[in-house]
Amino acid sequence: MTSTDVRKEAEDSGPSGYAAARLRLLTEGARSGPPRRTALSELTDEWLSGLFAAGAGDLRGVSLVAVGGYGRGELSPRSDLDLLLLHDGSDPRAVAALADRLWYPVWDLGVALDHSVRTPAEARRTAGEDLKVQLGLLDARHLAGDLGLTAGLRTAVLADWRNQAPRRLPELQELCAERAERQGELQYLLEPDLKEARGGLRDATALRAVAASWLADAPREGLDDARRRLLDVRDALHLATGRATDRLALQEQDQVAAGLGLLDADTLLRQVYEAARLISYASDVTWREVGRVLRSRAVRPRLRAMLGGGKPVAERSPLAEGVVEQDGEVVLARAARPERDPVLPLRAAAAAAQAGLPLSLHAVRRLAGSVRPLPSPWPAEAREQLVTLLGSGRPTVEVWEALEAEGLITRLLPDWERVRCRPQRNAVHIWTVDRHLIETAVRASEFTRRVSRPDLLLVAALLHDIGKGWPGDHSVAGEIIAKDVATRIGFDRADVAVLATLVRHHLLLVDTATRRDLEDPATVRAVADAVGTPGTLELLHALTEADALATGPAAWSSWRASLVTELVRRVAAVLAGDTPDEPEAAAATAEQERLAIEAVATGGPVLALRAQTEPPADPDGERPPGDPEPLGVELLIAVPDQPGVLPAVAGVLAVHRLTVRTAELRALDLPSGVDGTVLLLNWRVAAEYGSLPQAARLRADLVRALDGSLDVAARLAERDAAYPRRRGVVAPPARVTVAPAASRLATVIEVRAQDAPGLLFRIGRALEDAGVRMRSAHVSTLGANAVDAFYVTAPDGTPLPPEEATGVARKLEETLRG
């Protein structure tokens, strides 16, 4: 059925015909994208024009006007109809009756409607008071009635907008900034709002408004295509959900991707991110130009007076060879010859970042269009300029984005293309892969004074996740890529080896510190063997912190920092020639000894809660003396040795909604004259919400859990039934493995699972059922993922035989998956 046929059906059958024709149009598989939006707009135009003609009769001085998205002809399947009934004020009663004949059929069909009835003067006055109304009127399109009335309003509204632009454009910019603060940046969100987030459809519309002001214009290359892609995604989202929604929720992404003929949800997100990035960059450039023009207009009259009426000449200040500052931007010098100077892009970028200034759009495009490729290996100046750019801190981000917008980054570093705009489906990460790499370099720039080779630290920060664009373990793939890139940009063989090691082992310190027993010599020796030299260890320590800080709030804490620092201290001692001794049982503190004696005397558990604090951080990351910042609560428990201690404690904590951040369990040597064996549990916990329970209440429930009168499993099941989880992404199944050669003293069982209340209780109970003893537990939660390690032994205190260890791991995995 052609568009003409569809419109004819709507005309012939009235509202029901329009509904049928609309449904037919939306379910046609062969038509999508701009053609469908145009056809839907034309179909709606015909229907509304028919309603207007039937209701208006001989009425004059009235017109029906489409505004906003409908005015632009961008109707998505569930879009609102933005309509203005414009009249000359001569017959208000007849106009009101006409409005009823227009609005009620729309409502009867269940189509969302945003409507108003105004005279041209009222419309202009409302636009002057409400910026959103004025933006909608900029896209006014005549549908039916008095064409001259509509044309007059359009002309007046555009004239008002251009006359008021110096006042209203800053208001529009502020509105965009406030929306971005609320909704975030579309190019990084896992569940983005296609319309409201920064870089979305609202910003694209704002750029059209700026262009209509004639004050400044947006970079046009690719902008229409980016807008079209976002509209196509919104169309597919409306059809997939059957709702007028702009939020691309996780559970709808696969269906939306299929509707667009894309490979998978990651491909969908990458296209959305690319479009949003282009719109965001165009917005940055445009608002910068608006600011420059407004400042120029404010200053020009005074300059002309000072210069006797002559035209002022913009001042140009040199920054580097071939690079100058002009009007608050970095531009190329008049004598610059990009076609003869392949280092110029990096030199200009480094100069801009060091000065904290943006690269001008004209300069970047000139560089992209004429510069020669760098030879391989790069000259020393190019490598030095790259390091300078990476070490410039926060300004690096804006400069890097300018280079990337014009394709210069992938020309300098071809491997960048695989990580560009690549989403990370992990709640811990707040950035795409490429932005995370730049954020890591920004963080690493803060640590360049504490390492002997800041250049290697900054380049490692840029490359540490470069392997995420390839199949398999990204650290292994990244090591190969890092060797190639480091060689190409001119590092010598020794430096290439260090960079490859840093990329290969960039997760080693934090993984080991949070999931291994630091008292075990095998742990420290394994890290020392992997790192190799004190210099590499120093760089890896700084890279680890920079990487975690650039990941997101959940990836780094004072607790993780202290564990990593302690591991680095021990590894540094080994690399300096010290030999770690076999661990001895740590001497009990006075408080631990007191609790143990009391536990023996009472025959039951004794516990103490103690807040953990540290000084607050200043803006530079240092922690001077001052008011303490809470780190959580240390929970010390002493209990006579008996079966089921770990699941009992974990279960009671889960019942009281306490999150376990770290856990350690060991037997305690008692003072002479005190008989019995006491288990000491030293855990750090935090309340999920609300205040901490009283110690006496925890102890009472722990006593009941140990003697069997408190059914922890039933309590947790009742709570889960009372508060069912919301529908969301299906988490991958739990995975349990045995870490080979991780310890000579115990068998290390690693658990990776979706974090959930009672998870540690289930693990502890399964290990107890398997008949193994717990030496220590190292619990780590990253976003929604629990990554835990348990050091277990046979009842006689020796590591488990390999087959038995594998069997325990398999049974535990079955329990967690069940």
Image (cartoon, rainbow, N blue to C red):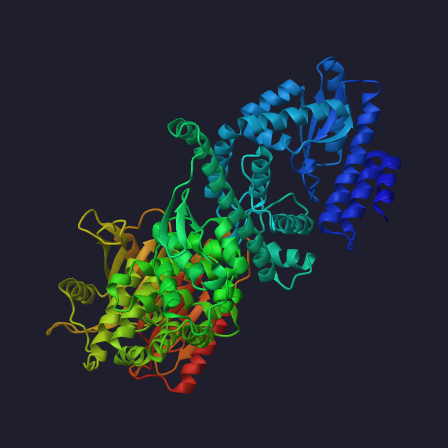
Left-right relation of 785 to 666: right
Q: In the displayed structure, would residue 37 be above or below residue 634?
A: above
Residue 760 position in % (x across, y down): 39, 65
Residue placed most toward the observer, 492 or 711: 492
Residue 169 position in % (x across, y down): 51, 33
Residue at the extreme left of the image, as rendered: 673
Residue 654 position in % (x across, y down): 38, 58
Residue beneath the point at 67% across and 19% down: 119
Q: Is residue 652 visible?
A: no
Residue placed most toward the observer, 487 or 321: 321
Left-right relation of 685 to 84: left
Residue 352 position in % (x across, y down): 39, 52
Left-right relation of 238 to 591: right
Residue placed most toward the observer, 727 or 233: 233
Residue beneath the point at 25% across and 49% down: 618
Residue at the extreme top of the image, as rendered: 90
Count the marks: how many? Answer: 0
Q: Using the rendered view, name the quadrant where residue 591 is placed.
A: bottom left
Q: Is residue 47 visible?
A: yes
Q: Using the rendered view, name the quadrant where residue 209 is placed.
A: top right
Residue placed most toward the observer, 376 or 308: 308
